[in-house]
Amino acid sequence: RIFSAGQRGASEAMQNHVINEEAQKLVDYLTNDLREACGIDVNLPPLVSSNNVSSLKSDDPNNKLFFTKYEYDFSKNPSMLADGQVNYTQTKIFYFVEKKDPLSATSAYVLVRKATPWDDMRKAKTNEAKIRPVCDKLESIVFYRILPLPTDTRGMGARNIFLKFLLT
């Protein structure tokens, strides 16, 4: 009995470690992407009051994250650029959530990342867009920003992006 209880405890601890590792990988991946971002869409994720955070749903059509990364090419002389050409390229990153099995009401969610590069003429290279799942073990996931309060001294608010998720 003691041996089997110890085995059960060790097995549960290993499962928790795997879940924590998956959660840490997801947070690290999103944090690194956002750290490199130069601009975040003003409408995505949505602004909500702190009282309404618990009512956010994973399958809400506005449950998205959209931002842009710029990569400057300082070897180009700005005075030598063609009309409409810029000395940078950009990548538009779009995170969205979809059900693993769209026909199942209880299906897990998948967080998907779509990265679309743009050239130095500010044209999207849609044929080079990369779409890949980031995490497919999500029971729920929501992105949001908090509406700033007039007396907010904690630094929280519209500038910060929050993530709330539950792994399966």
Image (spheres, rainbow, N blue to C red):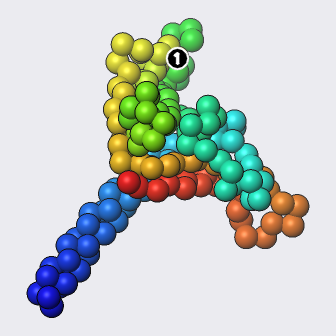
Question: Is residue 3 depicted above or below 111 in this figure?
Answer: below
Query: Looking at the image, can residue 71 be seen?
Result: no
Q: Is residue 79 left or right of residue 71?
A: right
**Label 1 amino acid?**
Arg
Q: Is residue 15 above or below residue 136?
A: below
- Image quarter hosting the C terminus: bottom left
Residue 61 x/y as whole percent? 61, 31
Side of 117 where 146 appears, left or right: right
Query: How far from the left and from the top, in percent, is residue 44?
Result: 64, 37
Per the image, the residue denoted by label 1 is 122
144 or 93, nearer to the observer: 144
Closer to us: 6 or 116? 6
Residue at the spot 58% in from the left edge and 47% down from the top edge? 143
| Residue 1 shows in the view | yes
In-front residue for pair 5/109: 5
Local SS, label 1: loop
Q: Residue furthest right?
A: 150
